[in-house]
Amino acid sequence: MKLSEFDFDLPEQLIATRPARPRTSAKLLVAEGAATRDMTVADLGAVLRAGDRLVLNDTKVIPARLFGTRSRVSAHGDGVAKIEVTLLEPQADGMWAALVKPLRKVKEGEEIVFSPDLSAVFEGRMEDQALLRFNLTGDDFDAALNAAGAMPLPPYIAAKRAADAQDKQDYQTIWADKSGAVAAPTASLHFEQWLLDDLAALGVAFSHVTLHVGAGTFLPVKVDDVSDHKMHAEWGQVSPQAAADIMATKAAGGRVIPVGTTALRLIETAGRSGRLEAWEGDTDIFITPGFEFQIADGLMTNFHLPKSTLMMLVSALMGVDRIREIYAHAIANDYRFFSYGDSSILLPQSS
């Protein structure tokens, strides 16, 4: 397969920089088999039915974007230089892997100060990433990071505006629980508690799993033959209870519908045998057309970047030609795209 097969033209004005308010007022494109309907997320109860199960990613986004200063010594005298840091993931030895701008000018042993409470020492490099050791750990680190950090908005939003205090609420799901993500599972941003309550009353069940979304989710595919692309790895966990409940839903004839590509990738990783088992570890599963889904019966997801791995995933679920139809419909009907955009629910089989 060629990368060009997953390309499309998107009008700039359809890229959302703020979410719909209220969250459930976002548009919802319902693609069920060959049929396409235009609804809103508030109408989700008219799409789902008793016995269905939504799989929700309970990862929590950390305010991973930091702006700091470092002392600079040069031939022109001492000074202070600004530096930008995006945390990626904690390391086993207590350090953090991070993207640092400008990385080439930072020397080992230098201290970067982010706030009166939070600082880090530059310990070295790991390929194009920096290794930082912070002055705080545990709850003290979390509190200082929350005070000093900004939400790590996707590049296509960050290029248009800086993150602000509102993003700390907007770029977080209402059920976020386990800290570790540096990007949100954005399909989940459309939910409010009343909608969860209404769906539960309808007979829809919920299971929580955890996949810490990494910054690699925004990395472009740089190869023309997509089979040559190497996926970034992300840590995930499926509990024994979640695995048992999801398999019980399938056995009873209900539909298992992950909310977001992260939840889908995780349960398909843990269910490659055809049976979902408790699982924990790093997954770099790459889902492209031809993939045989074992657990997911559908997917609720936002609209994705052209030529991205997520376009390949939804094409695998619905078929390349059908996804082209769905995206053409979304563009023609002014659906808002990407992380803060509108939603879709993709059901390969009509009911």
Image (cartoon, grey):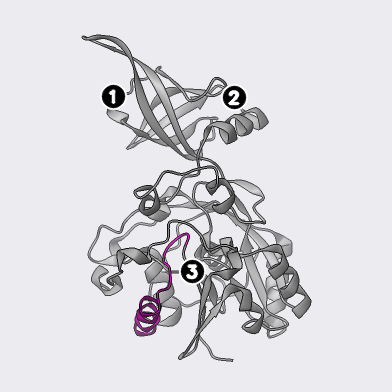
- Residue at numbered disc 3: 342
**Residue at 54% from the left image edge and 91% from the top image edge:** 350
Q: First in sequence: mark 1 or mark 3?
A: 1
For label 1, count other residues whose C-alpha is less than 10 Å away and answer few (under 14), some (14-19) or many (20+). few
Alpha carbon separation for disc pair 1 and 2: 24 Å
Which secondary structure type mostly characterizes the magenta part of the structure?
Answer: helix
The disc placed on residue 105 is 1
Q: Considering only vertical position in the picture, is 137 above or below 273?
A: above
Q: Nearer the viewer, residue 49 or 53?
A: 49
- What's the amino acid at mark 2? Leu
For label 3, count other residues whose C-alpha is less than 10 Å away and answer few (under 14), some (14-19) or many (20+). many
- Left or right relative to 207: residue 332: left
Quarter of the figure that contains the C terminus: bottom right
Q: Which residues are magenta?
A: 321-340
Quarter of the figure that contains the N terminus: bottom left
- What's the amino acid at mark 1? Lys
Helix, strand or loop at disc 3?
loop
Q: Quadrant of residue 43?
A: bottom right
Helix, strand or loop at disc 1?
helix
**Residue at 38% from the left image edge and 82% from the top image edge:** 329
Q: Is residue 84 visible?
A: yes
Residue 339 falls within the magenta-colored stretch: yes
Q: First in sequence: mark 3 or mark 2?
A: 2
Helix, strand or loop at disc 2?
loop
